[in-house]
Image (cartoon, helix red, strand yellow):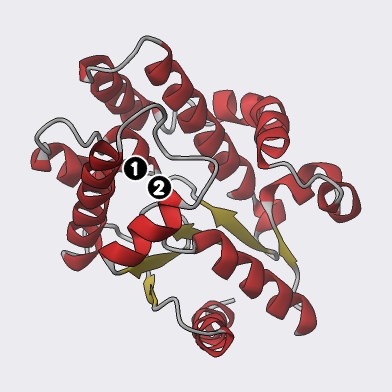
Amino acid sequence: MIVEFVGCSGTGKTRLRRSVYERLVDLGKPVRVPLELFIGQRMAGRIESERIRNVLLDILVFPWFWIGLRKHRDFLVFAFELLRKKKRPFMRPLLLLRSVIRKLGIHTFCSRRRCWDLIVLVDEGTVHIAHLLLVSGTEEVEWDSVRRFARIVPCPDHVVYVTASFPLIEQRTLARSDQPIKEVSRDELSLFLQEALEIFSWIFGEALVPAPVIQVENLGTSTGTLQADTEKVIRHVTASF
């Protein structure tokens, strides 16, 4: 069973996913993250760098991207169309395409029958591709493309949609060393974040994604709130596992 954590940059998706993972381990549930499925829990736990984890996944899931290519062909053509139209520096679309390929490869691998008896927690999976393809911060949102994306994107079994107030999102994102877009002003970054929040709010507000959605709001207040959000996610996930 694939459970994807999705939402605007800075909402606290990774923190919540880690908390859910630890709680599921405590409960004795068979939980994994994608890299653990390839190299084992012990080895994956030694790799702290997110960049190195992503490079490893790029290599390991690429064959599975090709295996799922025919099934996901329409979505990939759609992704190519959007990337081709975007007015971005030359390398930016290539980096985005690399992320799309990785996410589709992970989805294909984790959708196998062999993974049906596992709870696989995916941080920013296929639904999160909306952030890569549809958010620019500089161009008008193409709402028809947003609707089409939601209709054809390969979906996980459950989506955990993490949201937060814009001031909190902006504050958390500015404090990060790895910004979602590089070499831009604070105003440009704010516009990017506002657009991402608007798009995700519309996708999930209109229930466009055909998968069960668990919405969690990060209030940025206390550990107790994180624990309550963790239990909320676990109740929904374990009820259908």
What amino acid is at disc 1?
His
**Dot 1: element:** helix
Question: Total marks drawn?
Answer: 2
From the top left corner, tell me how far across and down residue 12 is, in percent: 48, 64
Q: Residue at x 30, y 59 (%)?
A: 210
Q: Residue 229: which disc? A: none
Q: In front here: 23 or 226?
A: 226
Q: Position of residue 158 (x, y in %)?
A: 46, 65
> Can I make out residue 3 in this image?
no
Q: Relative to residue 91, is residue 192 drawn left or right? A: left
Depth order, front residue of 22/72: 22
* Label 1 crowd (10 A; few <14 / some 14-19 / many >=20): many
In the rendered structure, the answer to whether residue 78 lies left or right of residue 98 reads: left
Q: Tell me the kind of residue under disc 2.
A: His
Horizontally, residue 37 falls left or right of residue 192, namely right
**Distance between the alpha carbons at the discs numbered 1 and 2:** 6 Å
Towards the viewer: 81 or 191: 191
Labelled pair 1, 2 in contact (Cβ < 8 Å): yes
Q: Which residue is mark 2?
A: 128
Above or below residue 48? Residue 220 is: below
Where's residue 94, x and y in %? 44, 16
Q: Is residue 190 above or below residue 203?
A: above
Secondary structure of residue under mark 2: loop
Q: Measuring 61% from the left and 60% from the top, which residue is drawn there?
A: 121
Which residue appears at 33% of the width and 32% of the height?
Answer: 75
* Residue 87, horizontal then vertical, whole percent: 22, 17
Which residue occupies 64% across, 73% down?
19
Q: Residues within 10 Å of mark 2 (few under 14, many from 20)?
A: many
Residue furthest out toward the top? 90
Q: Which residue matches tag 1?
A: 131
